[in-house]
Image: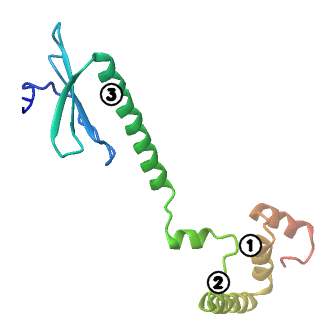
Amino acid sequence: MKYKYPENIDQSPKRRKANDNPYEIFAVGINTDHPHFFVRFTDGTGEHRCLEITAELFQALNEFELRGLSFLNEVDNHYEQSELTEASLHERAADHQKSVEETVLQHLQSERLHSAIAQLPEVQRRRLVLCYFGNYTYEQIGEMGEKSLGIFS
């Protein structure tokens, strides 16, 4: 005998569910004195079933779905914030080895930088070295120039 599904199902919030969730819960007449609660599922033989359940069981299944949804959202947020790809894992590696190209490029850039610094006038070269390599502020470098005779003259 085929079960007749209830009509006029109350609108319930549409929820995302886990792919392995085998059932759906819904209510009829939720705003009346005698609401009815149902669970709909497909049994092991492939038959669609719809059973009326108690309010307590409906509430328990509803809370279970909400906890499951909360867990799915937490998992999604975790995956969004921890992009686990080969490239990102390689970048995060503690012993990051540079490629030959990166090493040669860095060496060439370093040689060009030192060559350019060497071509600066003596005063500018001293100021640049103190600022960028000595981590002194402009004010500290200015005070050094006033106090130390000949450093910037």
Q: Are marks 2 and 3 in contact (CB under 8 Å)?
A: no
In terms of image quadrants, where is residue 36? top left
Q: Which mark is residue 62?
A: 3
Estimate how packed mark 1 is, as few (under 14), some (14 to 19) or many (20 or more) residues with alpha carbons within 10 Å. few
Q: Quadrant of the N terminus?
A: top left
Q: Amino acid at mark 3?
A: Asn
Q: Which mark's residue is nearer the viewer, 1 or 2?
A: 2
Q: Which residue in the protein does label 1 denote?
A: 132
Query: Residue 91 appears at what percent x and percent y?
Result: 59, 71
Mark 1 or mark 3: whose residue is earlier in sequence: 3
Which residue does the image show at 33% across and 28% down from the upper left? 61
Q: Which badge, 2 or 3, comes first in the chain's sequence?
A: 3
Query: Going 15% across and 10% down the picture, which residue do you hit?
Result: 32
Label 2: element kind: loop
The residue where tag 2 is placed is 98
Mark toward the viewer: 2 or 3: 3
The amino acid type of the residue labelled 2 equals Lys
**Quadrant showing the C terminus:** bottom right
